[in-house]
Image: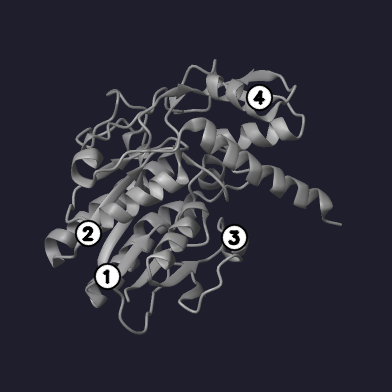
Amino acid sequence: MERTLVTGGAGFLGSHLCDALLQEGHEVICMDNLITGSRDNLVHIDSDRFHFMRHDVTRRIDMKGPIDNVFHFASPASPVDYLEFSIQTMKVGSLGTHNALGVAKNKQARFMIASTSEIYGDPLEHPQKETYWGNVNTIGPRGVYDEAKRFSEAITMAYHRAHGIDTRIIRIFNTYGPRMRIKDGRAIPNFMFQALTGQDLTVYGDGSQTRSFCYVSDLIDGIVRLMRSGHHDPVNLGNPVEISLLEMAEKILQVTGSKSKIIFKPLPEDDPKVRQPDITQARNLLGWEPRVDLEEGLQATLDYFRTSIDAQKAEP
């Protein structure tokens, strides 16, 4: 039985990763300081192989016993979060990654860093390959997240080269699904919350900016496959099907049956105009590509959001 540490394990992606690892028979230590994660994402887990550890990864990590795998997924991940927790975002990408790598080094464990498509910034290459170095405004409001992840990739490769740590780097493109926070600040949660509560859907700019949305179960499958591989360089994981944000807003009005209107507001600073992964490496190395189509994924997400909103209304 493998013993695995997941930092940020109470978050959207981290909690789904904990589920997948438990299903594979791992003993899972879920570490989270609950700044943006939630214990609600873990309440369904009923296993003596699961352990929750409330801890801030930017502080020293003392782990007892063997550790076979470290998945470092701790970080604010939406613009709302990393603008509010700007310094914490920089610290978790630097000090937190350093501490998580220290666990992997001390325990001789495999290590994966959850990086992001945001390291490409507002890209001048489209679609984005792993060889593209990016176009990031280091001092802009989004720079705290972009640069934290770029640093985390650099220190991960430094530990791989200097200490021989068995590392993986995953660059995650836009992902959606159950357990996203209702007011997460990202496009799909925003649109669904607004549609379900009768508010106007807010589209920034003219809505022509594009994203590529991957359903969470597909992403988790790719993550597990990458950890099993022997590949150390970055790998894009995401859905290569591109859609504009205006089209996404219209689609969510359709699936919810909402009569809400679409309104337009100014585009935030440094908001990427395009985002689409080249997943050639993932296909060739991992035999992976997304399988859940957008309509199916949106329906599952919608069901979750309806339940969450109804539960909030029922609270005294």
Query: In the rendered view, would you say 274 is above or below 141?
Result: above
The numbered disc on residue 253 is 4
Left or right, 99 with respect to 270, comes to: left
What residue is at 51 percent from the left and 75 percent from the top?
47
Q: Which residue is mark 1?
A: 104
The numbered disc on residue 167 is 2
Q: Earlier in the sequence, mark 3 or mark 2?
A: 3
What distance separates the C-alpha of mark 4 from that of mark 2? 42 Å
Local SS, label 3: loop
Local SS, label 4: helix
Q: Position of residue 257 (x, y in %)?
A: 71, 26
What residue is at 68 percent from the left and 37 percent from the top?
193
Q: Amino acid at mark 3?
A: Ser
Residue 8 appears in the picture as rendered: no
Q: Label 2 crowding class (10 Å Cα cut-off): few <14, some 14-19, many 20+?
A: many
Nearer mark to the viewer, of 1 and 4 = 4
Local SS, label 1: helix
Q: Are marks 1 and 2 in contact (CB under 8 Å)?
A: yes
Q: Amino acid at mark 4?
A: Leu
What distance separates the C-alpha of mark 1 from that of mark 4? 46 Å
Q: Label 4 crowding class (10 Å Cα cut-off): few <14, some 14-19, many 20+?
A: many
Local SS, label 2: strand
Q: Nearer the viewer, residue 151 or 273?
A: 273
